[in-house]
Amino acid sequence: MKASNVLLDKEMIPKISDFGMARMFGSEETEINTSGYMAPEYAMDGVFSVKSDVFSFGVLLLEIISGRRNRGVYSYSNHLNLLGHAWSLWNEGKGVELADETMNGSFNSDQVLKCTRVGLLCVQENPDDRPLMSQVLMMLAATDIATLPTPKQPGFAAKRIQMETETSSSKPDSSIFGSATVTIIEGR
């Protein structure tokens, strides 16, 4: 599931689209459009389960909260993608700062914190740590967020590192800039 597959009808009720249509396109195009939603176990080992869908839902939920997609860098000091940025804010006690800036503060902070927590629970690295979708629904309906489990580190909280390379040239201060994405996989 990805954000572009969720459509709203005239009553603003979400409808899921694109059931298997991605197979009609080349594999390269499909992977580019969906890689930010793939669970680590599927992307790395090809293992797919209901918990893979939970991961995708968690990414979608964090995208809705933040108004950002899970690609690019959102925490410039740490070079983190959306999942890493959400995790960093959560650990610093600043989870409400994940909220879409265009909302200009016109949101319920408790709802943002609850949805952020649920989103982070859904994108945990270990599939066994992720809730079932029935549990996700109960958590989203809960009124007391203190009763919700504490999330663990998300899978694919990738860092993007800007690299600078000096070159010899007639101009003493010229340089070439490149970028690379480094995914750090930590063992348990």
Image (cartoon, rainbow, N blue to C red):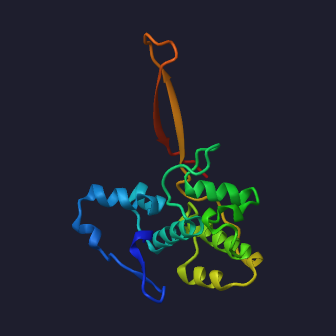
Q: Is residue 1 found left or right of 116 in the rendered image?
A: left
Q: Is residue 35 visible?
A: yes
Q: Position of residue 152 (x, y in %)?
A: 65, 62
In front: 59, or 177? 177
Residue at screen point 42% across, 54% down: 44
Q: Is residue 150 found left or right of 131 in the rendered image?
A: right
**Dividing the picture into quarters, in which one does residue 21 lie?**
bottom left
Q: Residue furthest bottom?
A: 11
| Residue 3 vertical placement versus 139 (above, below) | above
Q: Position of residue 71 (x, y in %)?
A: 48, 54
Residue at screen point 54% across, 66% down: 63
Q: Position of residue 125 (x, y in %)?
A: 56, 60
Name the quarter where the N terminus is drawn.
bottom left
Residue at screen point 65% across, 62% down: 98
| Residue 178 vertical placement versus 154 (above, below) | above
Q: Position of residue 135 (x, y in %)?
A: 60, 81
Q: Is residue 104 found left or right of 24 in the rendered image?
A: right
Q: Number of callouts in the render?
A: 0
Q: Is residue 2 visible?
A: no
Residue at screen point 42% across, 86% down: 9
**Dividing the picture into quarters, in which one does residue 77 lie?**
top right
In front: 138, or 22? 22
| Residue 159 vertical placement versus 173 (above, below) | below
Q: Residue furthest top?
A: 170
